[in-house]
Amino acid sequence: MAFFKRHARLLVSLFFIFLTTAGIEWWMGRSLLGPDGKFGLWEGSIWSSENSQRFADPYSFSHFVHGILFYAFLWLGARKIPVRPRLLIAVLLEAAWELLENSPLIINRYRAVTVSLGYEGDSVLNSLSDILMMMLGFLFAWRMRPWLAVATVVVMEVGCAMVIRDNLTLNIIILVHPFDAIREWQLAAQPPP
């Protein structure tokens, strides 16, 4: 109970951000739990129609990396601000990204230039999980030595590139400027229909 008293304003603010994000996404037509309406904890295939619909998926690692990067950027640019307000700033940035990512603008961009050919957007559950994963990455970076946070980013980025042929770095590159060679390499891993 002491934890909740000490962090009441932070927890209320986080609850409000999560609730607002969920409400806006639902209003935008996002499914709460995915098209089948069933809760799912994990979807491991980026080629599945269930990807970005369940609580977690391989892109959850990218959101964890978002948290580490947000921590680093906010530490560099706003280190005099206490960590709780910096966490709120990071959560607001991630929530804004989730809203943008699930807008027709970004959904259509993903379909046009990335390997996410049938991407329909995230479920509300997946979006909220993405924000939570970012928070975990932020808190991890806050508590760990910088070299360990950097090593974690490298391991996650290299691991995701090897396992799913996608990661945060490749995603940003392809969204900003598509490279046919990267897309062909990624599509070569697609299982046959």
Image (cartoon, rainbow, N blue to C red):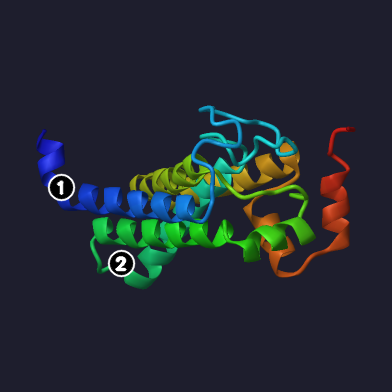
| Identity of the residue furthest to the bottom in this view | 77
Work out whether 42 lies above or below 140: above
Tell me where residue 25 appears, x and y as whole percent. Answer: 47, 53
Which residue, given by chain and number where applicable, does mark 2 sit on? 79
Say which element carries label 1: helix
Say which element carries label 2: loop
Asked whether residue 15 is in view, the answer is: yes
- Looking at the rendered structure, the number of numbered marks drawn on it comes to 2
- Amino acid at dot 2: Arg
Q: Residue at x 25, y 56 (%)?
A: 84
User: Quadrant of residue 34 in the image?
Assistant: top right
Q: Residue at x 71, y 47 (%)?
A: 166
Q: Residue at x 64, y 47 (%)?
A: 157
Q: Is residue 51 left or right of residue 151?
A: right
User: Which corner quadrant holds the C terminus?
Assistant: top right
Q: Nearer the viewer, residue 67 or 16?
A: 16
